[in-house]
Image: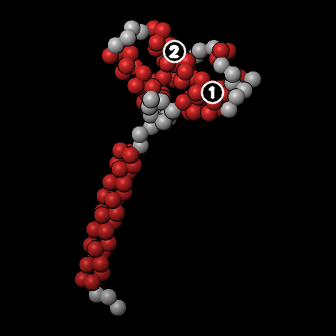
Amino acid sequence: MATKAEIESITRVLAAKDNQIEELRSQLKEARRAADKTYHGWTNYATWRVNLEVFDGQDPEGFDLTQEAYDLGHDLKDYAEELIDATSNEGLARDYALAFLSDVNWYEIAKHLIATIELEA
């Protein structure tokens, strides 16, 4: 049978281990938060921003929403590039705008548009 001193020693060790576990949990939570590159539920900032600024609330009649999301994504990208070309002058700003589009997850926006139309039907 353990003595009172041994029990107290074991209790202190267990309390220290509990503190270490809580610290590790906190570090893991912070690491997960830092690794999460999503933005407002979208793949990244570029995808969220282009969806919000270009496609959100727009009448999707000009797009064939019966095609696969992958193909629709290509059409959406072409549309966004044409929009930038039509509404901006050649130069640095246009180049940056077009470069920004390279980070967009077009497939995700296409899936979102298709799902939105299906919900409205």
Residue drawn at the location 58% of the way across and 27% of the way down:
74
Residue type, numbered disc 2? Glu
Asked if labels 1 and 2 touch by Cβ distance under 8 angstroms, the answer is: no
Placement of 11 over or under 69, stated as above or below:
below
State the residue position of label 1. Answer: 72
Residue drawn at the location 28% of the way across and 68% of the way down:
16
Quadrant of image for the C terminus: top right
Residue drawn at the location 54% of the way across and 24% of the way down:
77
Residue 103 located left or right of residue 24: right
Quarter of the image where one finds residue 7: bottom left
Placement of 34 over or under 53, stated as above or below:
below
Q: What is the x, y in percent for residue 68?
A: 68, 32
Residue type, numbered disc 1? Leu
State the residue position of label 2. Answer: 82
Residue 53 at least partly seen = yes
Residue 74 located left or right of residue 2: right
Q: Nearer the viewer, residue 68 or 59?
A: 68
How many C-alpha atoms fall within 10 Å of the one at disc 2: few (<14), some, or many (≥20)? few
> Alpha carbon of mark 2 to alpha carbon of mark 1: how far?
15 Å
Q: What is the x, y in percent for residue 36?
A: 41, 43
Among the two numbered marks 2 and 1 on one chain, the one whose residue lies closer to the N terminus: 1
Look at discs 2 and 1 and give the one toward the viewer.
2
Judged from the image, the secondary structure of the residue bearing numbered disc 1 is helix
- Mark identifier at residue 119: none
